[in-house]
Image (cartoon, rainbow, N blue to C red):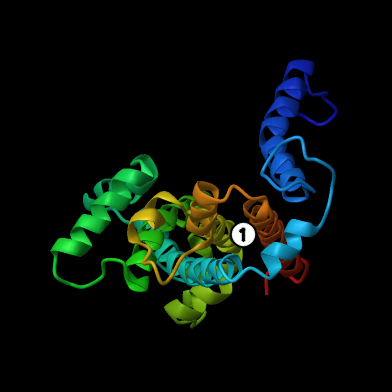
């Protein structure tokens, strides 16, 4: 859209409806978690911090929340490294394997989570490698799900990348690693940051794959919420959802601040 042009009314209405679809469920979770009643109902029977306190003192939800945070953090680190390297190779390779590998990397986004989780569980259980119902197996499942997100965002950042900048750095005596660190990395850093953020959010809230691969001793937050709703139907589960929403918001703000801060200082 050119400068000075106004946005057509249908687009404004569509954007408002899309925003409502995204925000209304969040609002419902927040109000339900602040419910003063004894059961998970909407609209709430008054507002209270009763269930917030119940979450903070829960012997089930707090460990599950911390475990999900640790799992998402480790997943993000691994998926960001693998996804960035894969995106660099896929966008620059001339090999015939490029399109094939690109399709394979996208498959975890296309396959239903139940199918992927079941496939990984069967493989880990029958292969004899001992990863079924283990933290390592769960971590592998989350990395498989989140790596395509990093590949997509970093690949988008590399679309208009001018490789002559790297060649100029190499001609001035920089090593390949130094050229990547001083030239390529600052340019694609926003794509890497966005991919890492998506990976963290998806891993923290991943349910289908987690349902098949999590062990009874290491229960992530989505499974703890699911179990609570099956047997108790208390607003504590919604209170846990509030803290999950706050974590996502904090991660988004932090990532945005870091990217803007680096841009302010020339990407250094």
Q: Quadrant of residue 141?
A: bottom left
Characterize the local packing of mark 1: few (<14), some (14-19) or many (20 or more) Cα atoms within 10 angstroms.
many
Element class at badge 1: helix
Q: Residue furthest left?
A: 127
Residue 48 is left or right of residue 219, and the answer is: right
Q: Quadrant of the N terminus?
A: top right
Residue drawn at point x = 36 percent, y = 67 percent: 215
Residue drawn at point x = 66 percent, y = 43 percent: 40
Q: Is residue 139 above or below residue 105?
A: below
The location of residue 99, given as percent across then percent down, is 28, 46
Q: Quadrant of residue 192?
A: bottom right
The answer, for residue 148, to whether it is visible in the render is yes
The location of residue 53, given as percent across then percent down, is 75, 64
Residue 129 is left or right of residue 161, and the answer is: left
Name the foreground residue: 220 vs 57: 57
Name the foreground residue: 56 vs 128: 56
Q: Quadrant of the C terminus?
A: bottom right
Q: Is residue 45 above or below residue 98?
A: above
According to the picture, the residue beneath numbered tag 1 turns out to be 190
The location of residue 172, given as percent across then percent down, is 52, 79
Name the foreground residue: 77 vs 71: 71
Name the foreground residue: 149 vs 220: 220
């Amino acid at each position: 859209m050119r400068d000075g042009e106004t946005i057509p009314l249908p687009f404004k209405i569509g954007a408002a409806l899309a925003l409502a679809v995204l925000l209304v469920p969040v609002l419902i979770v927040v109000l339900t978690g602040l419910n003063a009643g004894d059961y998970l109902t909407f609209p709430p029977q008054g507002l209270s911090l009763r269930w917030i306190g119940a979450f903070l003192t829960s012997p089930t939800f707090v460990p599950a929340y911390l475990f999900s945070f640790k799992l998402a953090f480790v997943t993000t680190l691994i998926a960001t490294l693998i996804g960035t390297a894969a995106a660099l190779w896929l966008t620059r390779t001339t090999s015939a394997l490029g399109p094939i590998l690109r399709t394979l990397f996208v498959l975890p986004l296309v396959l239903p989570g139940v199918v992927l989780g079941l496939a990984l569980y069967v493989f880990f259980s029958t292969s004899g490698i001992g990863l079924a119902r283990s933290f390592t197996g769960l971590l592998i499942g989350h990395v498989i799900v989140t790596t395509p997100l990093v590949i997509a965002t970093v690949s988008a950042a590399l679309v208009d990348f001018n490789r002559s900048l790297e060649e100029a750095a190499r001609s001035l005596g920089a090593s390949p690693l130094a050229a990547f660190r001083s030239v390529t990395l600052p340019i694609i850093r926003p794509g890497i940051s966005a991919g890492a953020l998506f990976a963290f959010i998806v891993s923290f809230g991943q349910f289908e794959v987690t349902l098949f691969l999590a062990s009874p001793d290491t229960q992530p937050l989505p499974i703890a919420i699911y179990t609570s709703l099956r047997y108790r139907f208390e607003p504590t589960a919604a209170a846990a959802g509030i803290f999950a929403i706050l974590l996502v918001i904090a991660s988004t703000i932090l990532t945005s601040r870091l990217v803007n801060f680096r841009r302010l200082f020339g990407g250094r």
